[in-house]
Amino acid sequence: MSSIRLFVTGGTFDKEYDELRGELFFKDTHLPEMLALGRSKLRVEVRTLMMIDSLEMTEDDRKLIVEQCRKAKESRLVVTHGTDTMEVTARALGEAAIPEKTIVLTGAMIPFKFGSSDGLFNLGSALAFAQALPAGVYVAMNGRFFTWDRVHKNKATGEFQEKP
Amino acid sequence: MSSIRLFVTGGTFDKEYDELRGELFFKDTHLPEMLALGRSKLRVEVRTLMMIDSLEMTEDDRKLIVEQCRKAKESRLVVTHGTDTMEVTARALGEAAIPEKTIVLTGAMIPFKFGSSDGLFNLGSALAFAQALPAGVYVAMNGRFFTWDRVHKNKATGEFQEKP
Amino acid sequence: MSSIRLFVTGGTFDKEYDELRGELFFKDTHLPEMLALGRSKLRVEVRTLMMIDSLEMTEDDRKLIVEQCRKAKESRLVVTHGTDTMEVTARALGEAAIPEKTIVLTGAMIPFKFGSSDGLFNLGSALAFAQALPAGVYVAMNGRFFTWDRVHKNKATGEFQEKP
Amino acid sequence: MSSIRLFVTGGTFDKEYDELRGELFFKDTHLPEMLALGRSKLRVEVRTLMMIDSLEMTEDDRKLIVEQCRKAKESRLVVTHGTDTMEVTARALGEAAIPEKTIVLTGAMIPFKFGSSDGLFNLGSALAFAQALPAGVYVAMNGRFFTWDRVHKNKATGEFQEKP
């Protein structure tokens, strides 16, 4: 069993509720906790690259993600990411044409720490797609996978869709 | 997007707590609720075949599962199943040599209705494997997939492993 | 068993996560759901007076709460309220000197819909204090009760304390 | 603020799911975790007397509970207890006529570790009744309190009721 690299960039996935200020904020990633909850026995290397809302992600942030994916020794990678600009980062990764790697971006509509999150479902699906899909860049959301050049988030419904 | 058939057979996945008798029992499947929680937009046809503990599954039950998988018009199938004898049903399906279908069995160590279930993670991963793996019979547990002729549940640890 | 009046004013208790905008917001009160979860068999009349953050509560809002408490036919009342200005509303109710009524304000540090809420604990305790304490105005938080003229929220710790 | 003694005897409150054997079992009490979740700032001394299903509670077990309540230096006590024989232990405590102490028994219909438990609500209410009710022995369930000589669990509905 070869290992999977999991890059954390923040997004709704990892937001928490600050009970003193009544606001959402980022503290630490919940990915290790989520892997434990899923009884994952995969060899997963979790690395936090940044912890930001994807609306605040800059070109430099995206370059960093591309470089980290390019340099990773693993050939199967999952990137957690805010949903609002996931398709932008997917395009940056796709256009970088990183050879022989399966890279899957995923995220969540509801923070993991809130009762009704889709995060655990999405993480399970992203890790599975990363193992089973051929080399390429994909988004895994809503139980589906999309190639980087065809994915679009419908802001009105929150649903990821295939572009024509 | 072609549709996926999801056969429910019971197992820990769907157990609930009977608060009047203080026992675990089966009522209805939670699969539709879980798909909604995961914001799944897959076309999934859920069909309950039985609602039993997999330790009580008979040869006739397994024949029914094999026949239903053979007759299903979908080419991608997920079967929810108790973990104790999941490998036996996987073998029955594998030896039936159903052509041109990807069949993925999955389950849970903890009931979905209990806070700390692995069920949502496993469901996400099983649906992804069903979409991305070639025709064949597989078990999806612990974030991994196993072919039907190599899978074994370690009863001491609860972990699914590859047989040598 | 006489009935208890439960006035809803909003506060963290009832905040939800808007998955399309990534923000906290108010939709409907969760009080009936929480009473069902607690298997409450009390006769409780739930009435929503407003659905606001207590930092936005005006003098007019407080007058409305006081008038509604005064006019209620029940002699035991619980008011759900944001924690930030709970002591201000408690004072308004206390100074109104409503005779022969036990009025208990309570709230939550974490929204009920988020996994780790104190809301259900606080609701259980507020309903119990409303039944067992003599006429007067109280705040029920942190498992304790405070009279309206002695209660203070420590903003640094989030804890309710007794003023000297 | 004087301290409250909390005696743990087991019951549904503290049951967990053994994922290797697929059975309910007792491990450790969840009371400290529940007090933390409720942001309780009460001074509570938690002491585990036994960890059993209340259907298995013997006369000797009840004598132990009575003696521990009699000897406790605190005047306000909460006893967590399985619901099936809670009224029997309440009677044993009531007939023991322990002077100058408020003793409140409580429990849960659903284990705390399962998502839909009434435990946190009941704990909040029991601690409040223990602080606010006069000396005596009570059961706190369903948001209500019952004196030891009038309480009865309706086995068909799971509801606690007042005996005529």
Image: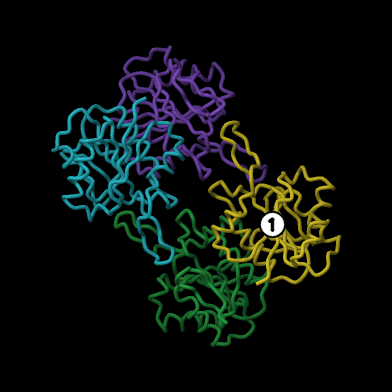
Chain colours: A green, B yellow, C cyan, D purple
Identify whether A151 is placed above or below B4. Answer: below
- Where is residue D44? Give x, y as percent: 36, 34
Dot 1 corresponds to which residue? B106
Identify whether A132 is placed above or below B24. Answer: below
**Which amino acid, mark 1?**
Thr
Q: Quadrant of the C terminus of chain C?
A: top left
- Where is residue C41? Give x, y as percent: 43, 31
Q: Quadrant of the N terminus of chain C?
A: top left
Q: How many marks?
A: 1
- Who's the residue at 72% across and 50% down the image? B9
State the residue in front, C64 or D125.
C64
Determine whether the residue tagged by mark 1 lies in a helix, strand or loop: strand
State the residue in front, B37 or D148.
B37
State the residue in front, C8 or B12.
C8
Tell me the subunit letter for badge 1.
B
Identify whether B92 is placed above or below D97. Answer: below
- Where is residue C161? Give x, y as percent: 23, 42
- Where is residue A129? Give x, y as percent: 63, 71
Mark 1 crowd level (few <14, some 14–19, many ≥20, 10 Å Cα): many
- Who's the residue at 38% across and 76% down the image? A56
Relative horizontal placement of residue A24, taking residue B89 as reference (left or right): left
State the residue in front, A69 or C72.
C72
Relative horizontal placement of residue B9, taking residue C104 as reference (left or right): right
Residue D162: quadrant of the picture: top left
Relative horizontal placement of residue D93, taking residue A130 as reference (left or right): left
- Who's the residue at 38% across and 23% down the image? D103
